[in-house]
Amino acid sequence: MTGSLGFTIGITILIVLLVILFFTFVPVGLWITAFFSGVKVGISNLIGMRLRRVVPSRIVNPMIKATKAGLDISVNELEAHYLAGGNVNVLVDALIAAQRAEIPLEFERAAAIDLAGRNVLEAVQVSVNPKVIETPVISAVAKDGIEVMVKARVTVRANIERLVGGAGEETIIARVGEGIVTTVGSSSSHKEVLENPDSISKTVLDKGLDSGTAFEILSIDIADVDVGRNIGAKLQTDQAEADKRIAQAKAEERRAMAVAREQEMKAEVQAMKAKVVESEAEVPLALAVSLKEGKIGFMDYYNMKNLLADTDMRSSISKMTKEDEYKE
C-alpha cells in the first residue's frame, strides 16, 4: 500500500513537471493571443521557433500588428528577417506607417533598408514629414577679399527608392557647403551677397546636390549671413611682411659680403705694406752693391741723400703748418 502511494506521488510529480516544462517551452498564452487576433500560427510553428532559437514573441506580436493593419505578411517572412539580423518590430511599424501615408513600400524593399543599417521607420516618417538639416557656419571669401560667414537650413525629404546605397546627411551638408563657397567666391563683392542672400540658395539649389543621396532637397534657406575678416588685406599685409623679411635678409647678406670684402682688402693692403717694408730693407744692400760694382758714383749717392733729406724736411714743414692751422 505504501509502495503504491509512493508510485502515485512520483507519477503526479512527473506529470506536474512535464506540464510546467511544456508551458515553459511552448508559449501557449502567446498562441491563444494570436488565435483570437486572427493570426494563423500553430503550436508546431512556435515549437520550431524555440528550436531555431527565435523568440516567438518577437515574431508573433509584430505579426498581430500587421494582421490588424491589413498587411499581407507571412510568419516565415518575419522569421527569416529576424534570423538575418533585422528589427522585425520596426519593420512592421514602418510598413504600417507607409500604408497609412499611401507611400508605396514593399516588404522586400523595407527589409533591405532595415538590413542595410538604416532606420526604415524614421525614413518613412521623414518622407511624410520633411526634415530640416542645419549646416554649421560656412566661411567663404568674395572677390573683394572680404570673408562672408553663412549658415543655412536644408529641408529634405527621404527618398525611399534611394535609401539603399544612397549617401546620408553628411554628404548633403558637404555639398551645400561647397555650393555656398562657390557662389560667394564668384560674387564680385561681399555687399552683393549681403543684399541678395537668396541668390545663394537659388544657385546652390540649381546644382542638383541631392543626386546619389538618400534624400530629396526641397529648399535651402539662408538662416544667417555675417561679415568676417578682410582676408584680402590680411594676405597683402602678410605678403608685405614676407617681402620685408626677404629684403632685410638680402641686405644683411650684402652687408656681410661688404664686410668680408673690406677684410680681404685690408689683408691685401697689409700684405703690400709688408712687401714694401721688405723691399725698403733691401735698398741699402742694393746701393752698396751698386757702389761696389761702380754702377753709381758717390755724388749720385749724396744727391739722392740730399733729395731724401729735402723731402723729409718738406714733410715736417707741412705737418707743422697743418698743426698751427688746427691750433688757430
Image (spheres, helix red, strand yellow):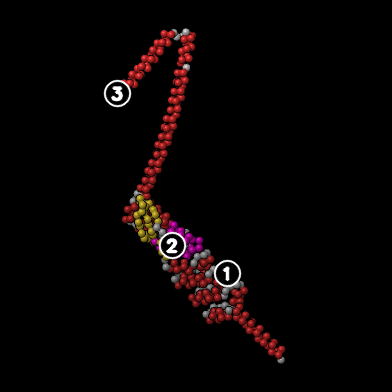
Q: Is residue 230 left or right of residue 100?
A: left
| Vertical arrangement, residue 263 with respect to residue 123, above or below | above
Outermost left residue: 328
- Secondary structure beneath dot 1 equals helix
Q: Position of residue 136 (x, y in %)?
A: 41, 59
Picture disc at residue 325: 3
Of residue 198 and residue 96, the one placed in the foreground of this image is 198
Determine the residue positioned at 49% across, 72% down: 93
- Dot 1 or dot 3: first in sequence order is 1
Q: Nearer the viewer, mark 3 or mark 2?
A: 3
Q: Position of residue 35 (x, y in %)?
A: 55, 80
Residue at image position (61%, 72%) is: 52
Instruction: Report the residue marked by disc 1.
Output: 83
* Residue 194 falls in image quadrant: bottom left
Q: Residues within 10 Å of mark 2 (few under 14, many from 20)?
A: many
Mark 1 crowd level (few <14, some 14–19, many ≥20, 10 Å Cα): some
Q: Amino acid at mark 2?
A: Glu
Instruction: Determine which residue is flagged by label 2.
Output: 216
Q: Is residue 99 above or below residue 174?
A: below
Residue extent of the magenta highlight: 153-174
SS class, disc 2: strand
